[in-house]
Image (spheres, rainbow, N blue to C red):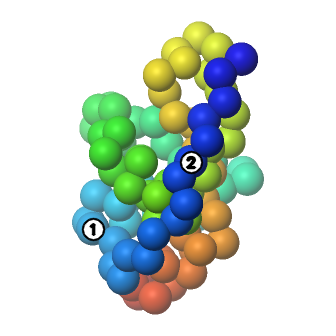
């Protein structure tokens, strides 16, 4: 099984609109699970997902054996805090 090792978090003062939309979807999901697809059925951009991981707002949750290139992530406490700081929650 392949294990994703995220890089050390970097300090990013604010989320982008794409990042906010992505992170916000984890607020009401069991365990803070973040989506693989947006509300229109399009795959969430890997750049958005990786930027959230680097910032510490999301973390990889588990490997997907069927689609190993998909990053299944969950919202972190820092992700909840940044949404609060951005006035989303």
The secondary element bearing badge 1 is classed as: loop
Q: For the residues carrying marks 2 and 1, which lies nearer the camera in this image? A: 2
Question: Is 59 rendered above or below residue 42?
Answer: below
* Residue 16, label in figure: 1
Q: CA distance from mark 2 to mark 1?
A: 20 Å
Residue furthest to the front: 8
- The quarter of the picture where the N terminus appears is top right
* Residue 62, label in figure: none
The secondary element bearing badge 2 is classed as: loop
* Residue 6, label in figure: 2
Mark 2 neighbour density, 10 Å: few (under 14) some (14–19) many (20 or more): few
Residue occupying the point 31% across, 40% down = 45
Residue 14 image point, x, y percent: 34, 79
Question: Is 88 rendered above or below residue 27?
Answer: below
Sequence-first disc among 2 and 1: 2
Badge 2 vs badge 1, beta-carbon distance below 8 Å? no
Answer with the quarter of the image where residue 88 lies.
bottom left
Question: Is 89 rendered above or below residue 64?
Answer: below
Residue 82 image point, x, y percent: 48, 79
Residue 9 image point, x, y percent: 52, 65
Specify whether residue 72 is in view: yes
Residue 73 image point, x, y percent: 58, 44
Q: Nearer the viewer, residue 2 or 77?
A: 2
Residue occupying the point 28% across, 58% down = 18
Residue occupying the point 56% across, 81% down = 81
Give the mark count.
2
Q: Is residue 68 left or right of residue 49?
A: right
Residue occupying the point 55% across, 60% down = 8
């Amino acid at each position: 099984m392949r294990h994703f090792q995220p890089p050390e978090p970097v300090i990013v003062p604010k989320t982008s609109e794409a990042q906010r939309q992505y992170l916000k979807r984890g607020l009401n999901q069991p365990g803070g699970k973040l989506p693989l697809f947006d509300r229109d059925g399009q795959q969430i951009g890997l750049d958005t997902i990786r930027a959230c991981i680097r910032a510490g707002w999301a973390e990889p949750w588990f490997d997907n054996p069927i689609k190993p290139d998909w990053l299944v992530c969950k919202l972190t406490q820092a992700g909840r805090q940044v949404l609060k700081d951005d006035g989303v929650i």
